[in-house]
Amino acid sequence: MKLKVAGLTLKIAGLEAGIVGLTPGMYCATNAVPLESVISEQEKEKEVMENKLSMEDKSVHGSESENGQKTVHSSGSKDGCPAGNGLFTRNFTLVVIGQIISLFGNAAIRFALPLYLLNQTGSSALYGTVMACAFIPTILLTPVGGLIADRVNKRNIMVILDFSTAGLILLFACLMNSLDLVVLLTLTLMILYGIAGAYQPAVQASIPLLVGQEHFVQANAVVNVISSFASLLGPVLGGILYSVYGLRPILAVCIVSFVVSAVMEIFIRMPHCKQEQEGKMLQIVRRDFARSIQFIRRDKPVIGKGVLVTCGINLFLSAMIVVGLPYLITEVLPFTTDEANRLYGYAQGALAAGGIVGGIGAGVLAQRLQIRKTGNLLVLGAVCVFPMAAALLWQNHGMVSYLIIAAACFLIMIISTVFTVQIMSFVQTETPEQLLGKVMALIMTVAMCAQPLGSAMYGFLFELCAGYEAAVVLFAGGVSLMIAVRTRKVFAGL
């Protein structure tokens, strides 16, 4: 797929990322000008910031590389290796192909394991609790991944983590019949989400190293489209395989996917400037975090305000969809187990399709997108929740209710992806290279903090309000709308 765009993405790969996907990532705003104008106006400020931070790091500009040669950085040319004149350079293409394969496996396994747990137990409270536990390692390891991404070759991070994921799934397949299911699934999901948390900062931070600044929006849009496309195929094919053959074939397919992705990534030539290590690891971690927090709070406070908004949306909207979508389709609507599993796979596919449409739309409309107006997207996303509540009042018409819920999730995902692409590109443009991995990791970590709490909360709410699930969805939509309306005023004034 080739995006023909002019102008310059967070998960939710699938729904989790952003749910840095459904999670509308992090939100920030600036003056009412297109992204290209923002970059032009802020270029001098960013250059001054980079030089200042480089003096503190004693390592980035004019530093010596491992072969003893001086490296000089410039826009679109890192570590003395030019990113290339076009978007689809050899290295960026390899990253994209590796992401297609890896994210397909990730989407399939994240779809199959929680659904298997829900089918075996039928408990939304247990499901929500397990999903909440699964998110904790993501929160803890995402900032670690950012710190590592700034100090280790990002290609090596991706290769090691893909091989590790394949090994983890193989171990789960060997132990699933001999250990307690809930304990084994919880531990496996926690490790999977932790790996993803360490993986994503490396991917996001690699984009500015492989493409020029003029291609940031296109590159981020491509990565988001790829993520959504993989998330589309993963649940759809996973739902078919799961309903017909069970869990084990999905595990085998995912193992192969991660191994192939890791092998593909070995051939990526990723520019890397080795930073000097000053002090012990704990001191380095504390100093890097302090720099990232200082940058967000003092140098770019608008980013910090956006992160707080994201926490609210993740808590009340994203978590409701993460927990509610599988529970409502498989346990509430009047479908047989096999039919419900397939339909849930299709609903996850609808989410991913929304991500694809949103990613393409963000790329095509790159010149027209204005940060000042992004608050309106949050309002639209919150409004889309209310038809879901209405659909639950017509449970006797199971397929009609299902189609309304799936369509609402599709629209929410389009809105989320457009928002995410725009904001991620802004953050990447405004952040100095030597802070990019750390800042991206910190933003994702804070934005995801509300996700475990929200998952646990909605798991218990759906079980407590059995028979009145529409009230829970209305609650989510109402609170999200209030947050969105107040946020729109903040964005309009920046």
Image (cartoon, rainbow, N blue to C red):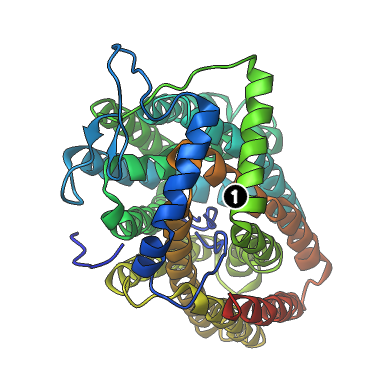
As drawn, is 254 to the left or to the right of 325? left
Of 65 and 350, which appears nearest the observer? 65
Which residue matches tag 1?
443
Count all numbered tags in the image, as a single digit: 1
As drawn, is 483 to the left or to the right of 14? right
Quadrant in which the C terminus appears: bottom right
As drawn, is 273 to the left or to the right of 480? left
Residue 286 location, x and y as percent? 69, 29
**Which amino acid type is shown beneath numbered disc 1?**
Ile
Of 212 and 145, which appears nearest the observer? 212
Residue 410 location, x and y as percent? 45, 73
Of 77 and 473, which appears nearest the observer? 77
Quadrant in which residue 84 is drawn: top left
Residue shown at the point (39%, 55%) measured from the top left: 43
Q: Residues within 10 Å of mark 1 (few under 14, many from 20)?
A: many
Indicate whether 88 appears above or below 232: above
Quadrant in which residue 330 is drawn: bottom right
Indicate whether 60 appears above or below 314: above
Quadrant in which residue 29 is drawn: bottom right
Quadrant in which the N terminus appears: bottom left
